[in-house]
Amino acid sequence: MWYQLLLFLLNIFVVIFARHDVVENYVADENYIKPSELVIFQYDNRYNDAENGYWSIAARWNQRYAAKYKHIFIPLTMKGNCTNSNYLLSPVWCKVKAMIEIHKIVPYAKAYLYLDSDAIIVANYSISSIIGYIQQDLNWDFNKKPLAVNQDGPGWPCKHTLSRAYNYCLNSGTIFWIKNQLSYDILSHWWKSSSFSLDSNNFQRNWRLKWPWEQAQLYYVYEKYKDNIMRLSFPDLPYMPWNSTRNPRAQYPTDTIEPWCWSHMPGANCFIQHHCQSNNQKLKIYDVYNERYQKSNDIKIHPIEMNKCPSIQVYDA
């Protein structure tokens, strides 16, 4: 019992006090994107249902982060069913629609970062500096690969994917892109693919309504555009190298990922913590938020309804 309590407190400590000193010596170059030109946004259709749901707590966290580092933060929501071409989709599919809508909501931005509603940014630097550091470290050509997807790591979704579908693992919880025609085309193709045949990817299930939902067609899109999509954080590896040497019997790996990682589950010490693996992980969002902001958790978010936005127009680069 005491050991489990110690691990729980350690996870909270890592989330709140995570340091990513690899960025400390980053020097901006011509690829640097100013914080005010980079939009961070989240989508969830439940923002108006429960102010204290984990999705709202995560949005409040990220809104505070964005304000601190001068980024724009936009929470998006939608009423009614998620549909495309008369197909009923799982609500999570409409986060892809949100990635297209955001171009109209903040048209002057130069880059966008989408976060799932259970993801929080815990880094001590702006996303502008982090992306700038990653771009230099990986020699990332923004013109050739304007869009970045996140790798998945050890866990049942990745194991399922490796055993039944693909030889690499992706996670759609954090999507970053530079605004240009190519990135818009990739995102548009992803959204349109929600109406494609169920056998257009290798998961062999009704992904329109069941897991892996939009992530199934992310593999389809990646296969089509792999020369134009950056895979973070280890583009030459099939999945995130996350080990558990400290506690081999742990439910999840316990080691931090070195030298850095873009986004993964709590404890990996990535720039973004994605509480995606279980309800218990999502509940930790309450703990870390209340630990840091226990005296000032009355911040309000003001989600924008996508239904009230103009119809989707093709972006003119």
Image (tube, rainbow, N blue to C red):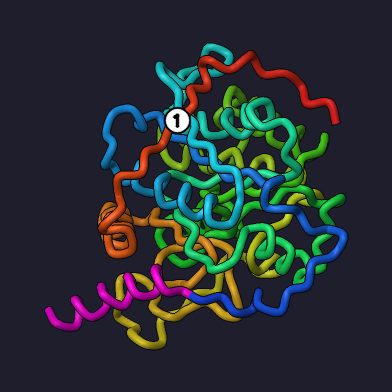
In the picture, measured across the screen, residue 164 lies left or right of residue 220, that is: left
Estimate how packed mark 1 is, as few (under 14), some (14 to 19) or many (20 or more) residues with alpha carbons within 10 Å.
Answer: some
Q: Nearest the camera: 70 or 250? A: 70
Q: Which residue corresponds to the image point at 56% horizontal and 75% vertical from the top-left?
A: 20
Question: In front: 127, or 204?
Answer: 127
Report x, y in % for residue 145. Answer: 80, 51
Q: Answer with left or right where residue 151 lies relative to residue 147.
A: left
Q: Kindly identify the residue that appears in the image at 52 percent across and 68 percent down.
A: 270
Amino acid tagged 1? Pro
Residue 314 lies left or right of residue 66; in this view the side is right
Q: Name the spot of residue 275 as percent of width and height, x first.
A: 39, 56
The residue indicated by pointer 1 is 303
21 relative to 145, above or below: below
Place of residue 225 in the rendered image (x, y in percent of width and height, measured from the top left): 77, 44
Magenta residue check for 5: yes
Q: Is residue 53 magenta?
A: no
* Element under disc 1: loop
Locate residue 92, reporting x and y percent: 45, 34
Residue at x-position 54% and y-position 68%: 124
Magenta region: 1-18
Decide: is 255 above or below 212: below
